[in-house]
Image (spheres, coloured by chain):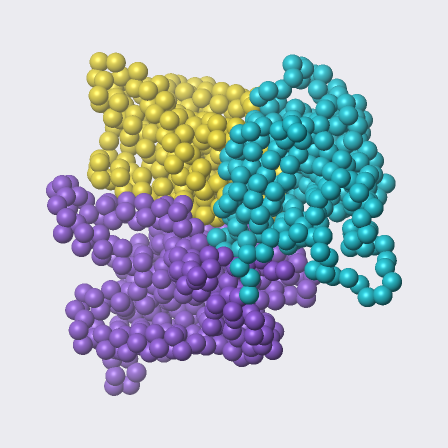
Amino acid sequence: MRSRHALSSAGFARAIESGGRYRKGGGAPLRAMTGSPYLKTTYPSDAALLGTPVRRFWLAVFGLAALGFPLVGTPVLMDLLCRTAVAVVGAHALNLVTGYAGQVSLGHAGLMAAGAFTAGILSEELGAPFWLALPAAVLVGALFGVVVGIPSLRLRGLYLALSTLALHFVILYLASEYQSGRGFATGLLVPRPKVGPWTLAGATAWYYALGGVATLTTLFCLNLARTRPGRAWMAIRDRDVAAASMGVNVAAWKVLAFVVSSALTAFGGGLWAYYLGFVSVEAFSFFLTVEYIAMVVIGGLGSVLGAILGATFVTVLPYAVDAIVNLVPVPDRVHTHLFAVKFAAFGLLMAVFLILEPRGLVSVWSRVRTYFDLWPFRYHPLKG
Amino acid sequence: MTIPLLEVSGLEVVYNHAVVAVQGVSLRVHEGRLVVLLGTNGAGKTTTLRAISGFLGSDNAEITQGTVLWDGQRVGGLQPYEVAGQGITLVPEREKIFETLTVEENLATAVPARRARGESRRESLDQVFRHFPVLFERRRQTAGYLSGGERQMLALGQALLCRPRLLLVDELSLGLAPLIAGNLLGILERLRAELGLTILLVEQNVAAALKIADYGYVMEHGRIVYEDTAPRLLGHADIQEFYLGVGREGRAKSYRDVKQYRRKRRWHG
Amino acid sequence: MQLLANTLALASIYILLAVGYVVVYRASRVLNLAHGELMMLAGYAFFGLVSATPGHPLWAVPAALVVSFLAGVGVYATLVRPMAGHPLFSAVLVTVSLGILLRGLVLLGWTADILYPLAVTGYKNVPWPLPGGAVLTTIDLLSILMAVTVLLALWGFFARSRLGIQMRAAAENPLLAAQRGVNIHLVFSLSWGISTFVAGVAAVLYASKVRLDPEIGVIGLRAFPVALVGGLDSLAGVAPAGLAIALLENLAIRYVSPLLSDVVPFLALLVMLFVRPWGLFGTKEEIERV
């Protein structure tokens, strides 16, 4: 297994993140120089997710808390966490294509709509059960991923983003034609997922289901990121010409990035449809795309942890605004126009994050870690 | 001893809040002199130049210690156009011209520094075309289509139109055929003589650079390890071995063994 | 003939808005996705000024334009300038967040009610008969006139004047331009100011002709494909692109369905992206940027 730092020009930053420099085969003086105990001397330990005791400990704590949460959680909180879980899936999907592969995609809402509508249409028109409709949604997403991926071979950056945006509008147009043409003016109803005698209903059940799905998705993305696809995508993101000259099949990997991302996005859309029990085209406006982009950017592009942090932040924000407005005395107008306030607050926070912390919450975290890793030194020393 | 035009003292530059690129760098450039900064890749020469000219912001780097004194005033940390206004002009290593503009338009973008001589724009432009006739021939051509040597000439011409007192040139001969590089270095020396320019030149082509320079500094791993007048540098045995490829019997020497190299070591494991 | 008249009228609004995208893109290489919302803001500023000066409504027009110009400068100073060293994607996202913020603030301040600034001024938008049985209103004619004037003025500025050349240089490489003495902050503020100024012109015309509500920014978003089809860095391309897309839209309304006409600009965009991504008159090198 090749070192994950080989291809990425951001590898240097990652080296800092992983806690000091490391040498294969061990070297004693280095420990004293950097003061960091996180030396890695074998390949498996380098790629390990839970390589240090500290990480294992905190993950265990977090896992226990997450599993036990329904015992103390209110329905509102459980609902919030379920929404967060779906957002995490969508954020991971967007992070794969935009953060890792560097292909800006503005069609996120359209793809979620594709997944949601596929699940809705199949269960409504054909009475398909969820274990057929959801994979079908994933397949539809993958197909759209191919459609979106083809322009990526010719276009870059802004122009590619625009072609994804155009696709978004096309999908929404199709969905709205369907919705009005088939008489579902207010939207499609989606029945609860059923497997045999078990129906997925109730806050707790959904919490565990969605939490589990989100965890699996996170693992999936982590594994993609630290193995060959992730390295290929990062290489393409940083310098695709250089990547091609190193033997990375840029075309194939680009299309694959879109396919995987779109499939996962459609999956998220399908989940959303089942969770809400309801699908309507109005829910999938361009603003939804903006929300997901905000999640990925505020969290930190190109980082799995960032996607989770960002998804949580953006999902929780309206609830936080609610809480603040109820606690702090504000003019009546704010109460009557709460939606506008939430809207404006989102815009403001997104702008603030982009200006002050463009590398996202993850970079704040990595600065904290670097500080403690290097302490009592302030910087990595010069060699020689 | 006259006050140097440019004085850098104890400069320390940090990238990304975590990595030191340059430490304890001190150099002096007196008016009318041509000083050369030598060193291999990664020594910190470009970082030093960019720190002087205010370019660091976009590299996510900052000056954490030390001062840059220009004519007695601090300029470290100023915006690039403020530094240019003071009379310091940098010809960078990469991205030195505007590729989508024509040659003429490239030259039109230069704004003369505040305390420039009372020459008219027309005269300055004629002077540039006199030094670089090929620019006149290609004046309506889009700059992106110029060859490497022509680009470098355009970059120099543009820099001259800013009427600098101090010209910082980063890797003049990078990517150029030796003949063209030598030609350009010769033009640089002529400019210094004609216009009384002060020049700080970063160069990897040590032999050619030391021939036209007055004084030289050698950088390694972010520190200045040696400085001397140019003729003495050319004759220095270690410079000859490390940079000029003049061989030595027996095993190759490491610079660590050389006592003359002064190195400021602080905390080091 | 009416089709042609309608096309010219619609195209002129599209052209005025598309020019704003092009000017900002040429100058700061940023795609200002808040352009529609800035136009909306200008419309509300116009309404506010008109309501505040009942006796002299016509003064509200230049006043609103001045406010628009200053809004552009303000946007640059507070949002775009701090993003100077950051990747382009982030800068574009900042404009998106600005759009959201503005929309929220306007909703908060004026609610979603539809307003009619022209009614407040007391003027009426009279139709003028044209040869061939077509009809155009005063505002339509004004729009066409303004579109032509703005195009000519800006083209002259960027191609000939020294400041225009410096703006193009600063657009390509702000750091290098700064080192050559160009005051890039002045140059960028100016370009943003010009962009919102022209958007203000479009806003005043549109709000007077049709209506004012928080959704009129959508017109701004539809003008964006116009800018792209013409070439994002090309002022020359704005006119043919605007005319073509306006024509296609009017044809769609007449022969297919009004729903389709909303999507027409984006369909045109899709086609353009496949056939000729840099637009009709854009520089091919643009593709490699971002």
Q: Is residue B254 left or right of residue C171?
A: right
Percent across and percent down for residue C257 are: 39, 45
Residue A73 found in image quarter? bottom left
Front-most of A115 and C47? C47
> Can residue A37 be seen here?
yes
> Can residue B136 be seen here?
no
Percent across and percent down for residue C213 are: 28, 36
Front-most of C37 and A270? C37
- Residue C86 sits above or below residue A97 on the image: above
Instruction: Say which residue appears at 65% left-offset and 48% top-offset.
Output: B224
Instruction: Say which residue appears at 76% left-offset and 35% top-offset.
Output: B214
- Residue B5 sits above or below residue C102 on the image: above
Location of the C terminus of chain B by quadrant is bottom right
Residue C142 found in image quarter? top left
Write down the colour of chain B.
Answer: cyan
Instruction: Say which residue appears at 77% left-offset and 36% top-offset.
Output: B213
Q: Is residue B76 left or right of residue A369?
A: right
Q: Which chain is yellow?
A: C
Write down the colour of chain A.
Answer: purple
Location of the N terminus of chain B by quadrant is top right
